[in-house]
Image: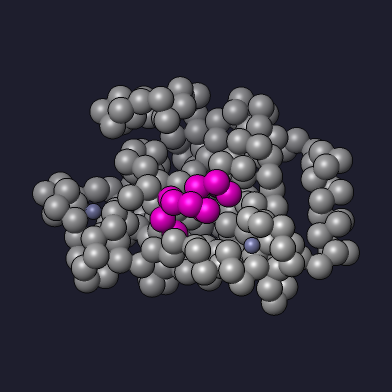
Amino acid sequence: MPLPTFRTLANGLLCSLLPPVCQICADPGERGHELCGACSLTLPWHSDGCARCALPLHEDADALCFRCEESPPPLDACWASLRYEDPVSGLLLRYKFHSDLAAGRLMANLMALNPPPWALAPLVAVPLHPSRLRQRGYDQAAELARLIGAPRWKGLRRIRATAPQSERNADARRHNLDGAFGVVGEVPQAVVLVDDVMTTGSTLHACAEALRKAGCQQVNAWVCARVP
Ligand SMILES: [Zn+2]
Ligand SMILES: [Zn+2]
């Protein structure tokens, strides 16, 4: 693991000394959170998604979308705490691409405020390839899983570097991930995959397939934000 930068250490120290400030508008935070009352009212909470892919349905919480009915995905259940809309999309971009770890801390807090309706098995973060981790200096999904504070299992590895998914269509995304994930050690019976953003789900599905191949019986996923 890379050492924390001076900025990270300084931020951590300042956070423990200063009252919390809203991560969106910089007003004072409310009740000890890094979010003010006005901004917290703008959050796109998500609760009415398909039970297996979290796609917004505007129906029953237990319902499945057409696609999951037709061909069930390798995830048994999927929960998104938020929708990938303003201001969540901006916070996640700051967290993922601009080393804004305070935004990541807020996102983990928001995930914990809207947790999945099912029991939590050990959390398994969608891993970064070591070369990407070296570039970025931190692993955004692993940080979210750590900050949520539930038990974790760390045996899922990215064994092959892949091109960024954001530049590909759905079909290319699936093939891009063939053989990208592997498992080290004995896999638990049930796990909950954790990631920051879910778009088509191809990354989570590739992880779920690797975990199932290694003997995992139940693979659920919990993401911070679902692209509608
Ligand atoms: Zn605010
Ligand atoms: Zn679905």
Residue 88 colored in magenta in the image: yes
Residue 190 colored in magenta in the image: no
In this image, 195 relative to 28: left or right?
left
In this image, 40 relative to 163: left or right?
right
Q: Is residue 188 visible?
A: no
Quadrant hosting residue 64: bottom left
The residue positioned farthest toward the left in the image shown: 70
In this rendering, is residue 194 above or below 173? below
Quadrant hosting residue 99: top right
Query: Residue 138 appears at what percent x and percent y?
Result: 67, 39
Residue at 70% over, 35% down = 137
Q: Is residue 225 visible?
A: yes
Q: Quadrant of the N terminus?
A: top right
Q: Quadrant of ligand 1?
A: bottom right
Query: Residue 94 appears at what percent x and percent y?
Result: 62, 42
In this rendered view, identify the residue nearer to me: 168 or 175: 168
In this image, 83 relative to 68: left or right?
right
Residue at 88% over, 64% down = 17
In this rendered view, identify the residue nearer to me: 33 or 205: 33
In this rendering, is residue 191 above or below 205? below
In this rendered view, identify the residue nearer to me: 93 or 143: 93
Query: Residue 183 appears at what percent x and percent y?
Result: 47, 40
Query: Residue 26 appears at what percent x and percent y?
Result: 71, 58
Question: Which segment is the magenta one?
Answer: 82-92
Residue at 44% over, 51% down = 85
> Total number of numbered labels?
0
The colour scheme is one colour
